[in-house]
Image (cartoon, helix red, strand yellow):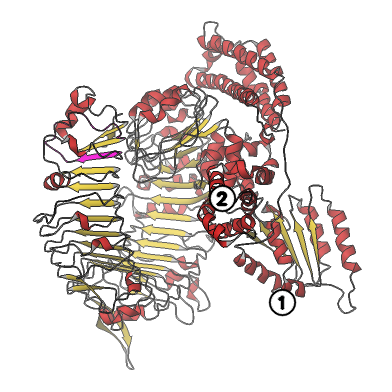
Amino acid sequence: MAALRKVSVLLEKLDSGEFVDNFRSMKLDFSVLKKLKKSLLRVPNVLDDDEEKQIINSIVIELLDGLRFAVYEVHNFVDEINTEALRCKVETPASKVLKYLSSPFNPFNEAINCKLLKLTQRLERLTSSNVLRGTRRSSPLVDESSIYGRDSDKEKLKHLLLSSDCDDSQIRIISIVGIEGIGKTTFAELLYNDPEVNDKFEFKLWEYISTDFGILKFCETILEYITSQTISCDNMKPIFLLVLDGALGVCSVDWILLTDILHAGKKGSRIIITTRDERVPKSMQTFFYVHYLKPLESEDCWSLVARHAFGACNDKQRSNLEEIGREIAKKCYGIPLAAVSIAAFLRIELSPYYWNNVLMRDIWESIGYDVQPALQLNYHYLSPPLKRCFAYCSIFPKNSILEKNVIVQLWIAEGLVESSIDQEKVGKEYFDILVSWSLIHRRSIGEENFEMQNLIHDLATMVSSSYCIRLDEHNLHKGVHNLSYTRGIYDSHDKFDMLYRLKGLRTFLALPLQEQSPLCLLSNKTVHDLLPEMKQLRVLSLSNYKSITEVPKSIGNLLYLRYLNLSHTNIERLPYETCKLYNLQFLLLAGCRRLVELPEDIGELVNLQCLDISDTALGEMPAQIAKLENLHTLSNFVVSKRNGGLMVAELGKFPHLHGKLSISQLQNVNDPSEAFQANLKMKEQIDKLALEWECGSTFSDSQVQRAVLENLRPSTNLKSLTIKGYGGYSIPNWLGDFLFGNMVYLRISNFDKCIWLPPLGQLGNLKELIIDSMLSIKSVGTEFYGSDSSPSFQPFPSLETLHFEDMPEWEEWNFIGGTTTNFPSLKSLLLSKCPKLRGDIPDNLPSLTELELRGYPFSVESRHLDDNSNFIMIIPFSHVISQLMLPLYSLRQFTIDDFPFLTSFPTDGLPKTLKFLKISNCENLEFLPREYFHSYTFLEELKISYSCNSMISFTLGALPVLKSLFIEGCKNLKSIVLAERASEKSLSFLRSIKIWDCNELESFPPGGLLAPNLVYIAVWKCGKLRSLPERMNALTGLLEMEIDNLPNLQSFVIDDFPISLQKLTVGYVGGIMWNTEQTWEHLTCLSVLRINGNDMVNTLMGPLLPKSLETLCICGLNDKSIDEKWFEHLTSLQNLEIVNAPKLKSLPKKGLPSWLSVINMTCCPLLKAKLQRKRGKEWRKIAHIPSIIIDDELIT
C-alpha cells in the first residue's frame, strides 16, 4: 500500500493540468511520457510495503534502492519542468512565454527530452527484474513476570480507582498510554489483581480489544455478564471494574454507545484502557484521566534485566557481571520488553566474555526478533505519508529536541505533506498523530518541545537508512537524499569532501537548528564551492555559523530549494539571485543581527510561506513584501516613512498570518485608518504580537498614537503581547479587557506620558507581567486590579512573575483591602530603579520563591496611622526589608543590588528557606551574623559582589549545605577561614569557589580547604595573596582551576596539584620563588591548559607537558618564534590556540605536529601576513592541519 500511494501521488502530478500544460507547451515527447507512466504502474508490484519486509539479500537491497532512487528522480523531473515554466512566467512578458517555451532552439527542452528517455529506460529495466521478492517475519510478544519502577504510577492510579467521588455521575475512565513494549498490559494486571481493588469492586471484567473488535457484541457480553451476577434487590447496580486492553482507534459513535450501556454500573465503577493512541480515551467524550507510562529509570531497568538473566545463580557470579550488565541495561532505554528480551540472551552464558560480546553488539541484533515487531505495530498502522514523515525524523540525532513547527516546515519542504490547500495545518495534524501513537512524545507535560525515545529512533533509522543519513554516524552511499550532521566549532572543508558525489542530495541540515552558543565556523569553500553544486537541494540549513558573512550569488542555482535557514549568521544582505528561488517556501533569517536589507525584488518569491527576520537590524523592508500573498508567517513588519514604502495597511493582505508578529516603526503611521485596515482583530492565529514605536519619537502626536493603538486591537486568542515606545496619554480600553483571557505574557515599556496603568488584574490567565520605563506613573492603585476592585474579586489569579523596572516617579503602591490576596500565585517579584517608591510593598505573597530588589535609596517613606490622624514618617530601609521578609515563608532566591547606603539586614536575618542569595553593589551592608549561619539549612549558592566592605574574613563550613561560593570585589576581605566546628559533612557539599578582585586577601585556611568534593576553584586579582590553599593534592575531585593576576604569590608547585585536574588556566603570578623544578608527569588527566603572559609561557612550556593534553592555549607570547620542542611529545594534542603574539613571525622549523586538528591564531599580525597567502615556508608548516583559523576566519 505504501508504494502504491507513493506512485499514485507521482502519477497525480504527471496527470495534473499544470504539468500537462507545461509539458505540451515545451513540445516534449508524449510517447516517452506514456512509457514512463506504464513503468511507474509496475512499481507497486515489486516495491509494495517493502518497509515491512526483512530483506537480507544484498542484491535485492541494491535493486530496491535503485528503484526508490529512480522514483525520486521522476519527482525531480516533474519539479524541473514546473520550475522552468514558473521561471519563465515570472521573468518573461506574458505574450512571449509560450513562444519561448515551445521554441525548437530552446536547449532546456532538448535536455529534458534526453533525461525523460533515460529515466524511462531505467525504470523499465528495474521493474522487469525477477529478483525483487521479500517475505514477512514476525514473532510473538514476550510476557513480563515482574514489575520494577512503577511504584509511583501504581500509587497514583490506585488512588483514582479507590477514591469515592460524591459528585460522580459518570463512569471514570483511566487510560494508560505508551509505546509497545513499555508494559501497559502488565501494569494494568498489577492494578487489576491488587487486593484492595478486589475488595472494592463487586466484579471485574478484562477484555482484549483485537483488530476485529465488535462493539455491539462486546456490549452484549458485558450486559450478560452483569445480569448473570447474583445481585441483591437493594443493590441492582453493581460496582465494577472493566479493563479494555490494547484498544486501537475505535470511532467515537461506538464509544458513546458503550458509555451509555456502562451506566448500568453503580457510581464508583471504573474503566481502564491500555492503548498506544492517546486519542482513544478522548474520543469517549466523558471524564477521563490519561496516564503516560514512561521508560524505566536505569536502575529499575537493570533490576529487571538481572531478575531474568540470573535466575538462581550465586551472588559471586552476579557480582562479577554486574558492571557489564548495567551498561547493557542502558541500551534498553527503559523499555521493559527490551530488558526482558536482552536478559534471555544474557542467560545463555553467564560469563564476562559472552556478556561483553552482547554489550558490543547492536541491540537490534540481540532483541530484534522480540521487540522490533512490537514497536513496528505502531509504525505499521500509519498511512504512507505518515510513515515517510516518521522516517524523516531519524535525520535528527537521539535525544534531540523536536520543535513541532520546525519539523512540519521540513516535512512540507521535502514534499512529505500531501495537501494542496493548507499544508501547515495538515502537517501539524500529522505531528499530532505521531504524538498520539507514542512515536513522538512531549519532554514534559505542557511543553511544546518533543523528542523520540531511543528505541523508537532506532526504528525510524532502520526504515529510513537507505535514503536518510546522519554524517556523523553512518557511511555515505549514492542513494542518500537527506543528510544531517552535528555542527562543530570548526567545520573545515575536509569534513564534507565526500559529498561531491551525492548529486541527488535533497536535504543538508547543520544541527541543532536551535540557537547555539558559541557560534561556529564553516569553511568558506564549502559555502561557495560545494553547496551550489547540490542542485537538487530542497532543504538547506547553515544556521549558527558566524563565519558566514555573505551568501554567494550561486545560491540562485538551487532552483528547487524550498527551505533556507541562515539564522544566527553574520550576513548583511541577501544577493539578488535569492529572488530566483521561485519554489522557496521558508526563509529563516532570525538572529542575523547584521542584516540591514532584503532584496528589492523579494516579491518574486511567489511560493514563500514563512519569512522569519526577528532580531535583525532591518530598518526598512521592501514594498514588494506586500506581493507575497502566500505568507502564513511574517515575524517582523517594519512600517516605512517613505512615500510608496511599506504601509501598515498592507498587513490586511495577509489574512492567514499565524505565530508571532512584530510591527515596528509605528511612529510612521500618520493616518489611524491604515492601522484599522491591517485587520489584526481578525488574525485569530497570531498568538504572539509586538507593537513598537521608536522611543522618544516626535513623528506623530499622542492622539494619533492612541488612535493607532486602538485600531491595532488584536484577536482575543492572543497569548503574548509586547507594547514599546507608545506616546499616548491614555491606553485604549481593550488592553486589560477580561475578554483577553488567553493572554499569558504581557510587557509594556517606555510609555513616557501615561499616568495610569490599565486594569490588567482582569486578565485571568496572565502569568508574566513586565512593566518597564513608565516614566510618568506616580501611583499604582485600584485601577490596576480592575473590576472596580470589589472585595470579592480576585485580581491576577494566575500571575507568577511581576517586574517593575525604571519607574522614576512612582511613589505609591496601593492594594485591595479585605480578605483578598493581591497576588496569590506570584512566584517571582522584581523591583528595580524605583527611587521614590515608599515602603508599601505586598506583605502577603504566599507563593513567592524569588525576590529581586535593585536600586532603592537609603530610607523610604512609609504611611502610618495613629489615633488622631494620618502622617508620614521616615524609617530605615533595613526595617522595610524586615517587614518584607517576615511573611515570605516560601522564598528560595533573593537578589539585592545597588543599595550603597544599606547597612544591615533584619536583626533576625533573612528567610531560612533561601536557596540562592546574591548581594551586589551594597558596599556598606554588613553581612549576615556568623551565629545565624547554621540555620540556613537550604542555602546552596552565595554571591557577594562589590559589597560588604566590613567583612574581614569569610568562614567556610558554617553554612551547612553551601555548594557554590563567589566573592568579588570585597575591599577588606583578608582571609578565608574554616569554622571551628566545621563538619566534614558540611564541607562535602562545596563544589565551586571563586575569589576575584579581593586585593587585601592574604590567606586561605591553614591545613587546606578540606572540601573533598570541590570541582572548581578560581582565584584572580588578589594582590596580597602569598600562597594558594595548602594540600591541594588532597582535593581529589578537583577538575578545573584558574589562577591569574596574583603578583605576590610566593609558592606555585605543580606537583601539589591533584591528579584529577582536567582543565588549568595559569596567568600572571609574578614574584614566584620556584621551590622545585616543575614537573607535569602526575597530571595524567589534564586535557586543557591555558597559559597567559610571556614569562609564564616560557617558564611552564620548558618542562615536558603532560601527554594527555588535547587543547593548549598560549596567550601573550612576546617572542618572534616558537620552540619546536614544546609540542613534539604532545601526541594527544588536537587544538592549538595562539593569542596576542604581536612579534611572532615564524613557527617551528619542522612545522606543527601532524596530529593537530585545529590551529587558531588571534592577534598575530606578522604571522597572519605570511599565512594568508596560503603559500610559502610558514604556510607549509600548517597546511596539513584540517582547520586553520586566523582572527575568527576559517581559511580551510
| Mark toward the start of the polypeptide (1 vs 2) | 1
Viewer-closest of 363 and 794: 363
Specify whether residue 1141 is painted magenta: yes
Magenta-highlighted stretch: main secondary structure? loop
Q: In which quarter of the image is the N terminus?
A: top right
Mark nearer the viewer, 1 or 2: 2
Marks 1 and 2, how far apart at CA: 59 Å
Q: Residues within 10 Å of mark 2 (few under 14, many from 20)?
A: some
Any part of residue 989 in sight: yes
Q: What element carries label 2?
A: loop
Q: Name the residue under label 2.
A: 351
Q: What stretch of residues is rendered in magenta?
A: 1134-1156
Any part of residue 929 in sight: no
Look at label 2 and name its amino acid.
Ser
Viewer-closest of 1134 and 1137: 1134
- Across and down, in percent, residue 483 comes to 49, 32
Q: Residues within 10 Å of mark 1 (few under 14, many from 20)?
A: few
- Across and down, in percent, residue 1002 comes to 14, 67
Q: On the rendered structure, is 1051 left or right of 265? A: left
Q: Quadrant of the C terminus?
A: top left
Specify whether residue 1082 is painted magenta: no
Label ID, residue 532? none
- In the figure, 218 relative to 978: above or below? above
Label ID, residue 166? 1
Viewer-closest of 1072 and 1177: 1072
Q: On the rendered structure, is 810 left or right of 654? A: left
Look at label 1 and name its amino acid.
Cys
Q: Which residue is drawn at 69% across and 30% down?
A: 3
